[in-house]
Image: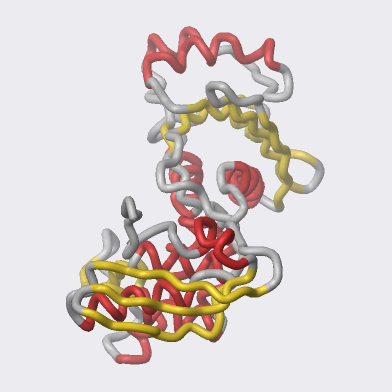
């Protein structure tokens, strides 16, 4: 789901708003905001129309009209797979971010609502990449335990922050520093996840928001395993799908198969009761089925 401004109440404006909402959803699901640009290409606009489940009009916090659009998750992921884009798993780790901003020579920790503008920038950048992010509350007790400086590239400087993280029980922790560098800004992040080796990023931007966005792109891409794209020569494949009891169910299965990566020459082979048989060519043959066709609604594996 995404909520976007609606310029005016016309069909053209609503279509444009749906495309913009689809763009945001693609960025969230893929973990990288720039992937949203695919929505504005011809294939992306068509995919937005197919994936749209519903939309509603409302009023934003600033009093302007907004459109809230909801999209079919399977079709969103199918489109990303067809575009060979990386995408995170369904369950994503909730990350606690300790960010020390060195602004005007006065280092300050970024909390849930302070400094207000920078906290909002961080939260919005994480949301655009589908990253569940927590910012610390920074109460008096917590502040007293925080170090005066931090270097995410030096694990020895993170001990106090690691101890302070326990109260939040996050899935993982991001240690960060934001500072001026040359004519721009530098954001450095270090990700710690249980049973995984630490990973770090350093990114630059013309301003604070650009540097943070570039660093968080690294996090989003790291948490997004490459979308599985079938490989090998095309080969004939047949699958049998049970539970197709009406035309709507049939259409959902057909759309899913059409968007599966590596599928071509899709055709129905048999229709009997609630069971349908589909034939198609798939790059990699039947061995590629688990990686391209099976995941996601409307399918659920059976014992047969």
Name the residue at 44% across, 74% down: 257
Q: How many marks?
A: 0
Q: Residue at x 47, y 56 (%)?
A: 29
- Residue 192 visible in image: yes
- The residue at the point 45 percent across, 35 percent down is 93
* Relative to 153, residue 228 above or below: below
Residue 278 placement: quadrant: bottom left
| Residue 286 or residue 198, whichever sits in front | 286
Q: Find residue 250 and report its horizontal and vertical position in percent.
A: 28, 79
Give percent across and percent down for residue 139.
Answer: 37, 17
Which residue is drawn at the image coordinates 64% and 33% (left, top)? 189
Image quadrant holding the C terminus, namely: bottom left
State left or right for residue 185 relative to residue 212. right
Front residue of 223 and 209: 223
Please tell me in which quadrant of the rendered image residue 133 appears: top left
Q: Quadrant of the N terminus?
A: bottom left
Can residue 17 be seen here? The reply is: no
Q: How is the image coloured?
A: secondary structure
Is residue 108 found left or right of 186 in the rendered image?
A: left
Task: Name the spot of residue 14 as percent of width and height, x first.
Answer: 33, 83
Residue 217: image x %, image y %? 61, 49
């Amino acid at each position: 789901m995404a909520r976007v401004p609606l310029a005016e109440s016309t069909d053209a404006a609503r279509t444009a708003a749906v495309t913009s909402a689809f763009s945001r959803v693609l960025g969230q699901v893929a973990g990288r905001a720039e992937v949203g640009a695919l929505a504005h290409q011809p294939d992306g606009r068509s995919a937005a129309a197919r994936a749209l489940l519903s939309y509603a009009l409302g009023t934003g916090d600033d009093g302007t009209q907004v459109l809230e659009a909801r999209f079919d998750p399977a079709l969103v992921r199918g489109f990303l797979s067809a575009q060979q884009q990386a995408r995170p798993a369904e369950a994503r780790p909730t990350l606690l971010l300790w960010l020390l901003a060195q602004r005007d020579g006065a280092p300050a920790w970024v909390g849930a609502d302070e400094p207000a503008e920078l906290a909002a920038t961080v939260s919005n950048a994480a949301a655009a990449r589908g990253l569940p992010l927590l910012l610390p509350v920074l109460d008096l007790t917590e502040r007293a335990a925080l170090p005066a400086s931090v270097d995410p590239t030096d694990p020895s400087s993170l001990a106090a922050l690691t101890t302070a993280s326990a109260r939040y029980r996050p899935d993982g922790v991001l240690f960060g520093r934001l500072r001026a560098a040359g004519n721009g800004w530098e954001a450095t992040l270090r990700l710690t996840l249980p049973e995984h080796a630490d990973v770090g990023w350093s990114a630059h931007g013309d301003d604070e928001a650009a540097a943070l966005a570039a660093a968080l792109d690294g996090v989003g891409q790291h948490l997004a395993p490459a979308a599985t794209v079938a490989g090998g020569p095309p080969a004939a494949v047949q699958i049998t799908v049970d539970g197709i009891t009406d035309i709507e169910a049939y259409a959902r299965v057909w759309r899913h198969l059409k968007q599966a990566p590596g599928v071509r020459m899709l055709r129905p082979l048999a229709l009997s009761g609630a069971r349908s048989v589909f034939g198609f060519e798939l790059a990699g043959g039947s061995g590629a089925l688990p990686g391209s066709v099976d995941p996601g609604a409307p399918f659920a594996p059976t014992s047969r």
